[in-house]
Image: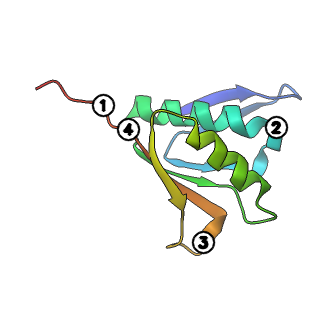
Amino acid sequence: MTEKNTYENDEIIELPIDGVLDLHTFAPREVKDLVKEYLRECLRLGIFDVRIIHGKGKGVLRRTVHSTLDKLDFVVSHRLDSQSSSSWGATLVVLKRPLLNQ
């Protein structure tokens, strides 16, 4: 399944919803809304563990991602991915699982 987003040049970008969001192809000003929408779609699809690739660089994009995650009530936790080769160039996110009726 993919989600279609339209950005400033009206180009439609197919974004797979598979639990891995690579931000390298997006403008920094698009990141806040993109992260929120992507995570909402992950929740809808039952994906609760997400990896967001923001790159290392100067850390501006990482800080934007973390600031956005801190404001989302459906994010249980997030941390830098220290286990992979990208190390602090990615963030692991855990989303709230829905309560099951018992």
Residue under the point 25% across and 30% down: 99
The residue wearing badge 3 is 87
What is the three-letter code of the residue carrying label 2? Arg
* Residue, disc 2: 29
Residue at 68 percent of width and 31 percent of height: 33
Q: How far apart are marks 1 and 4 (CA)?
A: 6 Å
In which image quadrant can residue 97 be found?
Answer: top left
Residue type, mark 4 in image: Lys
Judge whether 79 appears above or below 19 on screen. Answer: below
Residue kind at label 1, given as amino acid type: Pro
Q: What element carries label 2?
A: helix
The answer to whether residue 42 is seen in the rendering is: yes
- Residue 35 to residue 24: above or below: above
| Upstream in sequence: badge 3 or badge 1 | 3
Kind of residue at badge 3: Ser
Provide the secondary structure element on which disc 1 rests: loop
Q: Which of 1 and 83 is in front in this view?
A: 83
Please give the name of the residue rendered at 75% of the width and 52% of the height, measured from the top-left corner: 61
**Which of the labelled discs sits on residue 98, or is there none?**
1
Task: Work out whether residue 1 can be spotted.
Answer: no
